[in-house]
Protein backbone atom coordinates (compact mmCIF):
# COMPACT_ATOMS: atom_id res chain seq x y z
CA UNK A 1 0.00 0.00 0.00
CA UNK A 2 1.17 3.49 -0.78
CA UNK A 3 1.03 6.43 1.62
CA UNK A 4 -1.72 7.99 -0.50
CA UNK A 5 -3.78 4.82 -0.07
CA UNK A 6 -3.25 4.95 3.71
CA UNK A 7 -4.73 8.46 3.64
CA UNK A 8 -7.72 7.14 1.67
CA UNK A 9 -8.10 4.22 4.08
CA UNK A 10 -8.04 6.56 7.07
CA UNK A 11 -10.71 8.71 5.42
CA UNK A 12 -12.86 5.60 4.96
CA UNK A 13 -12.37 4.68 8.62
CA UNK A 14 -13.24 8.22 9.70
CA UNK A 15 -16.49 8.09 7.68
CA UNK A 16 -17.53 4.94 9.54
CA UNK A 17 -16.13 5.80 12.99
CA UNK A 18 -16.36 9.39 14.18
CA UNK A 19 -14.11 8.74 17.18
CA UNK A 20 -11.18 7.62 14.97
CA UNK A 21 -8.24 9.98 15.07
CA UNK A 22 -6.36 10.24 11.80
CA UNK A 23 -3.37 12.37 12.59
CA UNK A 24 -0.39 12.52 10.27
CA UNK A 25 1.77 10.81 12.90
CA UNK A 26 -0.72 7.96 13.26
CA UNK A 27 -0.93 7.47 9.50
CA UNK A 28 2.86 7.35 9.26
CA UNK A 29 3.18 4.93 12.20
CA UNK A 30 0.52 2.56 10.84
CA UNK A 31 2.12 2.70 7.40
CA UNK A 32 5.57 1.83 8.76
CA UNK A 33 4.27 -0.75 11.24
CA UNK A 34 2.50 -2.87 8.67
CA UNK A 35 0.16 -1.22 6.18
CA UNK A 36 2.98 -0.77 3.66
CA UNK A 37 2.97 -4.57 3.21
CA UNK A 38 -0.82 -4.90 2.88
CA UNK A 39 -2.68 -4.43 -0.41
CA UNK A 40 -5.15 -1.56 -0.23
CA UNK A 41 -8.02 -3.80 -1.37
CA UNK A 42 -7.33 -6.24 1.48
CA UNK A 43 -7.28 -3.50 4.12
CA UNK A 44 -10.46 -1.96 2.70
CA UNK A 45 -12.22 -5.35 2.63
CA UNK A 46 -11.16 -5.93 6.24
CA UNK A 47 -12.53 -2.51 7.19
CA UNK A 48 -15.83 -3.26 5.49
CA UNK A 49 -16.07 -6.67 7.19
CA UNK A 50 -15.24 -5.08 10.56
CA UNK A 51 -17.89 -2.42 10.05
CA UNK A 52 -20.47 -4.99 8.92
CA UNK A 53 -20.14 -6.78 12.25
CA UNK A 54 -21.50 -3.64 13.91
CA UNK A 55 -18.30 -3.08 15.83
CA UNK A 56 -18.53 -0.03 18.05
CA UNK A 57 -14.84 0.79 17.78
CA UNK A 58 -12.63 1.43 14.79
CA UNK A 59 -10.45 -1.46 13.62
CA UNK A 60 -6.87 -1.84 14.78
CA UNK A 61 -3.82 -2.08 12.56
CA UNK A 62 -3.80 -5.85 13.10
CA UNK A 63 -7.43 -6.18 12.01
CA UNK A 64 -6.79 -4.23 8.83
CA UNK A 65 -3.56 -6.11 8.06
CA UNK A 66 -4.75 -9.69 8.34
CA UNK A 67 -5.13 -11.72 5.16
CA UNK A 68 -8.63 -12.16 3.84
CA UNK A 69 -10.31 -15.44 4.71
CA UNK A 70 -10.44 -16.30 1.00
CA UNK A 71 -6.69 -15.69 0.73
CA UNK A 72 -6.02 -18.04 3.65
CA UNK A 73 -8.21 -20.75 2.13
CA UNK A 74 -6.53 -20.30 -1.24
CA UNK A 75 -3.13 -20.68 0.39
CA UNK A 76 -4.23 -23.88 2.16
CA UNK A 77 -5.64 -25.34 -1.05
CA UNK A 78 -2.49 -24.47 -2.97
CA UNK A 79 -0.29 -26.17 -0.34
CA UNK A 80 -2.47 -29.29 -0.36
CA UNK A 81 -2.40 -29.45 -4.15
CA UNK A 82 1.37 -28.99 -4.30
CA UNK A 83 1.84 -31.81 -1.77
CA UNK A 84 -0.45 -34.08 -3.81
CA UNK A 85 1.51 -33.42 -7.01
CA UNK A 86 4.81 -34.06 -5.21
CA UNK A 87 3.47 -37.43 -4.08
CA UNK A 88 2.10 -38.13 -7.55
CA UNK A 89 5.55 -37.53 -9.04
CA UNK A 90 7.20 -39.78 -6.44
CA UNK A 91 4.88 -42.75 -6.94
CA UNK A 92 6.37 -43.96 -10.25
CA UNK A 93 9.86 -43.64 -8.78
CA UNK A 94 9.09 -45.54 -5.59
CA UNK A 95 6.66 -48.06 -7.08
CA UNK A 96 7.59 -51.74 -7.06
CA UNK A 97 6.28 -54.47 -9.29
CA UNK A 98 3.96 -57.05 -7.76
CA UNK A 99 5.44 -60.37 -6.64
CA UNK A 100 5.51 -63.21 -9.18
CA UNK A 101 2.71 -65.18 -7.49
CA UNK A 102 0.39 -62.16 -7.78
CA UNK A 103 1.30 -61.70 -11.46
CA UNK A 104 0.55 -65.37 -12.11
CA UNK A 105 -2.81 -65.16 -10.33
CA UNK A 106 -3.76 -62.07 -12.38
CA UNK A 107 -2.89 -63.95 -15.60
CA UNK A 108 -5.10 -66.85 -14.51
CA UNK A 109 -8.01 -64.54 -13.74
CA UNK A 110 -7.62 -62.72 -17.06
CA UNK A 111 -7.51 -66.04 -18.93
CA UNK A 112 -10.63 -67.26 -17.11
CA UNK A 113 -12.47 -64.01 -17.90
CA UNK A 114 -11.45 -64.25 -21.58
CA UNK A 115 -12.59 -67.88 -21.76
CA UNK A 116 -15.89 -67.03 -20.08
CA UNK A 117 -16.60 -64.16 -22.50
CA UNK A 118 -15.80 -66.41 -25.49
CA UNK A 119 -18.20 -69.09 -24.25
CA UNK A 120 -21.01 -66.56 -23.71
CA UNK A 121 -20.67 -65.23 -27.27
Image: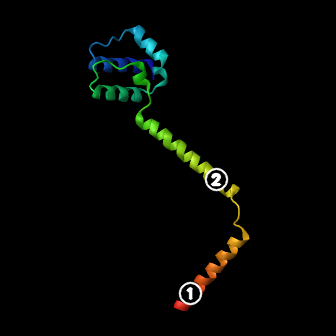
Q: Which quarter of the picture shows residue 63?
A: top left
Residue 59 at x, y = what percent? 35, 20
Q: Earlier in the sequence, mark 1 or mark 2?
A: 2
Q: Find residue 26 and name its label.
A: none
Q: Which quarter of the picture shows residue 108?
A: bottom right
Callout 1: helix, strand or loop? helix
User: In which quadrant is the N terminus drawn?
Assistant: top left
Image position of 82 (left or right of 23): right
Residue 33 at x, y = what percent? 48, 16
Residue 110 at x, y = what percent? 62, 79
Q: Residue at x 62, y 51 (%)?
A: 87
Q: Which residue is mark 1?
A: 116
Residue 51 at x, y = what percent? 29, 25
Callout 2: helix, strand or loop? helix
- The crowding category of the residue bearing disc 2, from other C-alpha atoms within 10 Å (few below 14, some 14 to 19, many at least 20), is few
Image position of 114 (left or right of 18): right
Image position of 14 (left or right of 62): left
Viewer-closest of 4 and 99: 99
- The crowding category of the residue bearing disc 1, from other C-alpha atoms within 10 Å (few below 14, some 14 to 19, many at least 20), is few
Q: Which residue is mark 2?
A: 89
Q: Residue at x 50, y 40 (%)?
A: 76
Amino acid sequence: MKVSEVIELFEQIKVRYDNFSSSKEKRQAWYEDGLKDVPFDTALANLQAHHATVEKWAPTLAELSRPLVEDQRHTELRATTEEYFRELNEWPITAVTPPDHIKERMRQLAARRTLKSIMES
